[in-house]
Amino acid sequence: MDQPSRGLPQWDLDKLLDVAKVVRDNASVPLSRFRVGAAVLTKGGAIFEGCNTECLIPVLGVCAERNAINHALIHGYSDFLAVAVVSDLYAPLLPCGTCLQYMQEFARQKSRDILIIAEGRSGERVITSLDELFRGGFPPETSVKDIQESFRWSSD
Ligand SMILES: [Zn+2]
């Protein structure tokens, strides 16, 4: 089946998934034992990988997708074209809402969508995009002040 890759060569998708599969083995998941690997492709063709990480305080855990993005940021890259995700699930696992919000903030800086590729252990592959999965979130014109005020308690 020739599944559309939304402008990315098939080679890039396969390579991105392969990188995510390798780094999935490094997941640090003492609580859930649920491993996830991710890889991001930058506009210049660089790939950065991340795995999920947990610790005894659950809220301090970080998803593989955000760790991959942070890995790229550490090296000075923030122009993302695609994110690949693999996990221990038989079916493809798509990024959570927190990761989608995180991706959106970088996508809107470049006024572009981000391709999202997820592959399950079954080999089933889902090719979608940030815009398709995440229609909510803070709109691009949101300021820090808007966000602070949206969380302010109001008694009226
Ligand atoms: Zn996530």
Image (spheres, rainbow, N blue to C red):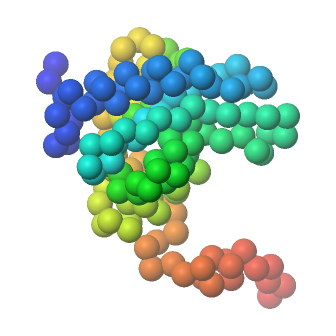
Residue 147 location in percent, x, y?
A: 63, 76
In the rendered view, does 45 fall on the left or right side of 145?
Answer: left
- For the C terminus, give its image quadrant: bottom right
> Quick check: 117 above or below 101?
above
- The image shows residue 143 at horizontal and vertical percentages of 54, 81
Q: Where is residue 47, by image quadrant?
A: top left
Tell whether 99 sits left or right of 132: right
Q: Nearer the viewer, residue 140 or 19?
A: 19
**Residue 96 seen in the figure:** no
Q: Residue at x 31, y 34 (%)?
A: 127
The residue lying furthest to the bottom in this view is 156
Q: Position of residue 84 (x, y in %)?
A: 40, 34
In the rendered structure, the answer to whether residue 59 lies left or right of residue 15 reads right
**Is the residue 89 above or below the residue 44 in the image?**
above
Q: Answer whether residue 111 is visible to the viewer in this image.
A: yes
- Write the residue at 26% across / 49% down: 44
Name the one closer to the observer, 74 or 153.
74
Q: Is residue 75 left or right of residue 109?
A: right
Q: Position of residue 37 (x, y in %)?
A: 51, 28
Residue at (56, 27) in percent of width and height: 36
Displayed quadrant of residue 48: top left
* Above or below, 114 relative to 20: below
Q: Residue at x 51, y 24 (%)?
A: 23
- Where residue 117 sits, quadrant-wise, is top left
